[in-house]
Image: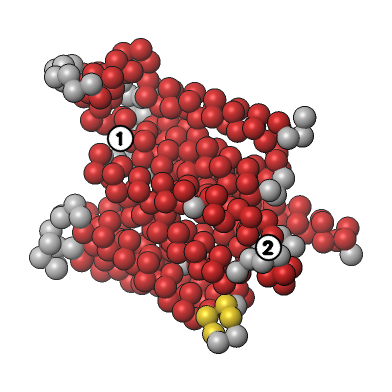
Amino acid sequence: MLRSRPLLLLLILLALLLAALAASLSLGAVNVPLAESLGVIVRHLAGAPAEPSTADLVIWQIRLPRVLLSVLVGAALAVSGALVQGLFRNPLADPSLIGVSGGAAVGAAIAIVLGGAMGLGNAQWLLPVLAFAGGGAVTALVYRLGVSPLGTSVATMLLAGVAINAMTGACISYLSTVAEDARLRNLVFWLMGSFNAASWPKVLWVAPFTLLILVMIPFVWRGLNALLLGESEARHLGFSVEQLRWRVILVTALAVGAAVAAVGVIGFVGLVVPHIVRLLLGPDHRWLLPCCAVLGAALLCAADLAARMLVQPQELAIGVLTAFLGAPFFLFLIVQRRRGQIHGA
């Protein structure tokens, strides 16, 4: 019975994901029946000529890329959060601690605010490339600061991440003060996160990095389980902690950097989802990581649907919605952690 519980939970989460996908495809400013939506997708996949209909335009050109992008980003952020929490052995850890989101935000801010001055106008490739480069550069710097001849210091990496996040915040604040009104609006909306500009190129941009972090799961879950006992115990069990650490940080930086570059900063997914799964399943990363991927995809897909439906005809930024849901949960975790420390004392 205990062995079947993780599989049962995974099947339930997959059912939730399918329900979220069906609702997100069908509902919106223009409601399209699910059967008609699936028919549009099947026709395009079969290579049949596109029909000049509203349903075809809404589903294939607008809604399907958006739904797929929300699934890819949700899975990437959730698994990244679980990996970072397992690596740092800190349940309150988040991918933003290592500076990926901050670095990517600076790169995107430069593209949005200074793109015209650089003579590149509104080139579609500029924002994702600079955001991805910013996230990667900051992560490399944090990792370099944490590495010494004596090994890798997690505490140093966390402190470096905090300091660099403060610097990136200052850079974004400065760029906001010199931005023109239209570019400032774009910057603010991007910093809140949104799937409004989802497109097939963005889906193809994020998909390889989400696939990479999912393929990585079978190669790291045993090491992360060993780390639950402590670094010394993991080494005694034959795991290379240093190798595991740089692999996890590299893959996390790539996945989060790609997600942030595509849709902006979306907070709390990497914090909340691993905790929900851990409460239901326990800390075994063999099942924790894939369940996080499915729940993260379902949660962000459903959140995007809510963002489209709640304030019609306008649209709520997805980062605002996840913050409203995630911040109280974060406070709840802090209170529970404090009570545990008091009772433990």
Up the image or down, 65 lies above or below 204; here it is above
Determine the residue located farthest toward the left in the rendered image.
Answer: 119
Residue 117: x percent and y percent?
A: 14, 67
Residue 109 tag number: none
Q: Dot 1 surroundings within 10 Å: few (below 14), some, or many (20 or more)?
A: many
Residue 65 tag number: 1
Q: Nearer the viewer, mark 2 or mark 1?
A: 2
The residue positioned 51% from the left and 61% from the top of the image is 248
Q: Which residue is mark 2?
A: 227
Question: Which quadrant is home to the N terminus?
Answer: top right
Residue 29: x percent and y percent?
A: 32, 24
Q: Dot 2 surroundings within 10 Å: few (below 14), some, or many (20 or more)?
A: many
Up the image or down, 268 lies above or below 143; here it is above
Quadrant in the picture for residue 60: top left
11, 264: nearer the viewer: 11
Judge left or right: residue 136 versus residue 248: left
Quadrant in the picture for residue 150: bottom right
Up the image or down, 130 lies above or below 310; here it is below
253, 63: nearer the viewer: 253
Residue 51: x percent and y percent?
A: 16, 16
Amino acid tagged 1? Pro
Quadrant in the picture for residue 39: top left
181, 20: nearer the viewer: 20
Judge left or right: residue 5 versus residue 304: right
Judge left or right: residue 1 versus residue 201: right
The residue positioned 48% from the left and 74% from the top of the image is 143
